Image (cartoon, rainbow, N blue to C red):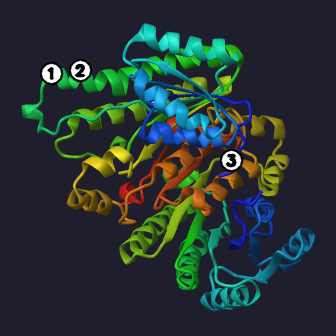
Amino acid sequence: MSFDFSNKVVLITGGASGLGLACAQAFCSQGAKVAIADLSQEAIDKAVDTLQQLNGEVIGLVCNVSQANQVDEMVTSVVEQWGRLDIAVNNAGISSPLNPVAKTQEEDFDRVMAVNLKGVWLCMRAELQQMEKQGGGAIVNMASALSTRVFAGGSFYVASKFAVAGLTRTAAVEYAESGIRINAVCPGNVATPLVVNTVSPEMLKELANVHAMKRLGEPEEIASAVMFLASDAASFNTGTILPVDGGWTAQ
Amino acid sequence: MNRLSNKVAMVTGGANGIGAGIVSLFINEGAKVVIADNNADAGNALADSLGEQCQYIYLDVTEASAWQRAMQATEEVFGPLDILVQSAGISRPASIEDASLDDWREHMKVHGEGAFLGCRAAIASMKKNHAGSIVNISSVESIRPGPLFTCYGAAKAAQDALTKTVALHCGEMGYDIRCNSVHPAATYTPLLQQYLESAPDPKALEKIYAGMQPLNRIATVEEVANSVLFLASDESSFMTGHQMYVDGGVLAKPYPSGQGA
């Protein structure tokens, strides 16, 4: 990957692990200044260490994306640090317990929606306010193959990711003439450390086989799509949801 | 820049317009590129201007034997194919009442049969290297055709279905061959420029074309080529069967109004 992000300021939520950390590594390796936001200071410190080994200019911010005041403070901190916000990757997300709709629980609904939907909305609101001020920017939301397909038992997660696609496209049309592009990446099943270390080999094979390519995605493959959409090479791409799913949703 | 170093690419319709932009970008990124086109003068001229890494080979995309010859010649010059970009196309806007059956058949032949023959020939060559990427140039008109894109919209939709079946087949077979499509909105090609200039009020028509996109402008050839490059390169190694819009947001908003859009 050879996009030049020298001096670009990038904010990545959920940046301390998994896809968020992979994105942070990718942006750092191309010269960006990267702020990673996550829930736990300990996880952030560890991730910042990793990123600094890539000679990255990095800061870590503790933020619960479902809390408006914390989200606003997060964006303020980035701007205080580097004066602007060029690229935001709204990646923080959680999964829901698997249950058919009749057996689902209200607290699970509230928890999943608070992070996956309200969190993305709050982040976009704060980021857009800053990007409007500076006259441009690019936002990439982490949606999912389950933004266009369903998975039985995962209704809350599916609904939250459908909503992220709708939010992405609406905001893209609203801000198209403000120099702000807004897109989403829709990963299939990805071999993040969490997945590889916690899922049984049989289940991993099942997860791989939903893709036409019959393998799991690599975190770097998601990161390169995020980087493409965030880069100037994608200057005419806005309001799109880009599957990186080995052909899952082509089926 | 070396995002395609040592890759062998063929670009159909590569002598002009979006195809020519893709050829130039691929050369800049280190690829060896065959311009496969039925316009020998333009194809040779472009190939000459880009140096030894670029070759022109005659191709009429609707002829099975021409594909065979072009692919054989490509392999002789550069080796087996890594990348095929199918950018050859025609477009004659006409409503269902004005389009002729010949219009319909010609669009279907170039976009439907052409893409079919191209994918088949490319897979045969790419299997020799056990990998490859096919990028079919489609259009926003295949997703949401305007009233004058009777033939073009239908032919591009046929091509889209082919893109997906090729992606799924290659996945099932365990080939590391990906197949995606790119869907530009209005793009500043010489053809579009000519069309705009031929209007009674070129500025007014250009404004209408630009206004269809939420970005309120027409795409440059380079912007379309950049997305093609991403899909052609290993950067998109987990993407297949996808329809990638380079549309300034037009497909994210409701149906645009007026003027045969």
Q: Quadrant of the C terminus of chain A?
A: bottom left
Q: Residue A22: x, y in percent?
A: 50, 42
- Reading the image, the residue beneath label 2 is A110
Q: Is residue B168 above or below residue A217?
A: below
Please state which of residues A54 and B66 is positioned toward the viewer in this rendering. Answer: A54
Pointer 1 and pointer 2 on the same chain: yes
Work out whether residue A85 or residue B142 is closer to the camera in this orientation and state it: A85
Kind of residue indicated by mark 2: Asp
| Mark 1–mark 2 distance (CA, rounded to whole Å) | 6 Å
Work out whether A137 lies above or below A211. Answer: above
The image shows residue A115 at horizontal and vertical percentages of 34, 24
Residue type at mark 3: give it: Ala
For the residues labelled 1 and 3, the Cα–Cα distance comes to 47 Å
Report helix, strand or loop for mark 2.
Answer: helix
Residue placed under numbered mark 1 in the picture: A106
Query: Which residue position is annotated with label 3?
Result: B186
- Quadrant of res B28: bottom right
- The amino acid marked with disc number 1 is Glu
Confirm or deny contact between disc 1 and disc 3 (CB under 8 A).
no
Residue A99 location in percent, x, y? 12, 38
Quick one: SS at disc 3? loop
Residue at the (23%, 46%) spot, across then down: A151
Image height check: is B103 above or below A217?
Answer: below
